[in-house]
Amino acid sequence: MKCGIVGLPNVGKSTLFNCLTSSSAAEAENYPFCTIEPNTGIVTVPDRRVDKLASLYKPQKVVRAVIEFVDIAGLVAGASRGEGLGNQFLSHIREVDAIIHIVRCFHDENIIHVYNRVDPKRDIETVETELILKDIETVSNRISKTEKLLKSNDKKAKEEYELYIKLKEHLESGRLAKYFTEEVLKNSNEHISSIKSLHLLTDKHILYVANVDDKHLGGNEYTKAVEEIASEEGEACIILSAGTEAQLVTLADDERTEFMKALGIEESGLDKLIRTSYKLLNLITFFTAGDREVHAWTVPKGTKAPEAAGSIHTDFERGFIKAEVMNYEDLIKLGGEAAVREKGLMRTEGRDYEVRDGDVIYFRFNV
């Protein structure tokens, strides 16, 4: 899973990125365009189930699920025409699975706002406009390439050309590409692959992150505006304080727990961000476990057993025979595989089985 972090300059993108990666990989200073190179970080997904399985199996190795985050320079009005620095890095987030849009929802005279006034609605519209304009550029380039194939009377090229023309008109009306994709899906799946091949920025799920100060972790007038926009777009929104998260990541576990208790929060903003990202992308986690390794694997909900096996190794999918499946809760409650088998709770599943979140699986295969 890969997420791109976008937003205006000085909204807290780099601070949040540093918290996510528990590093100082991204500079976080008080001036626009501080991030002049895209930063990439691999983040471990917090999952207590992995810890429980590790305690049970005592493996030689533990491998957790990970997410890759890409933080690009702040976008400003005109970025798609080369203003500022964000435009040249938009290509770095073209193939991410989702976009995390950081929106400033706090006042601070010591931190410059690029437009000198906090206004989440305007800020969101500014960034979305630049993403749409970049998508128009992408579609226009594809139209030019497809036009060359029309001379050969290629039927598929003609259909794609007409599709891209309609898509461009849709984008030029100021609408996100995902609404066009939704309409295409309602009618037919025939052209979805053509649209997906464009990797359009506005055809991705967006997680809005309302960045507040530590006094407004429960929200304020600005976060309400962000939540309304997210609701209208059918997307998710969370509220967190990048400044508070920056303090949390420096604390030991017991100190962090006390600090969170004092703030009245049960879950860190970073954990909430990762959990919400999973839900937004309809992802689940299954496990493989033994004395050699406990491993968490991430797949889309609805993934069939052979495909899940293929995420481990292509040979597993190619030679798939069956999957021996235990439920995580049963395994932990009963204290081991032997007890699960004795209770008749170890299931044998075939090729049509859809893997569920929390499954602990042994794949049987023959190549």
Image (cartoon, grey):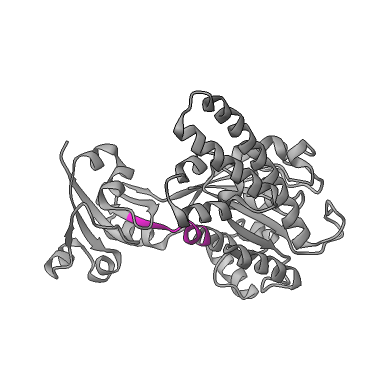
In the image, 308 versus 335, the foreground residue is 308
Decide if residue 238 is in sight here. Answer: no
Q: Quadrant of the C terminus?
A: top left
Residue, x 52% and y 55% (percent of image)? 183
Residue, x 53% and y 24% (percent of image)? 151
Residue 343 relative to residue 226: left or right? left
Image location of residue 18, percent across then percent down: 63, 49
Image quadrant assignment for residue 282: bottom left
In the image, 157 versus 355, the foreground residue is 157
Residue, x 64% and y 60% (percent of image)? 209
Image location of residue 293, percent across then percent down: 30, 48
Decide if residue 107 is in sight here. Answer: yes
User: Quick check: 265 above or below 341?
Assistant: below
Residue segment shown in magenta: 276-286
Image quadrant assignment for residue 243: bottom right
Image location of residue 135, percent across then percent down: 64, 42
In the image, 141 versus 218, the foreground residue is 141
Image location of residue 3, percent across then percent down: 55, 48
Whether 110 is among the magenta residues is no
Image quadrant assignment for residue 216: bottom right
In the image, 100 versus 247, the foreground residue is 100
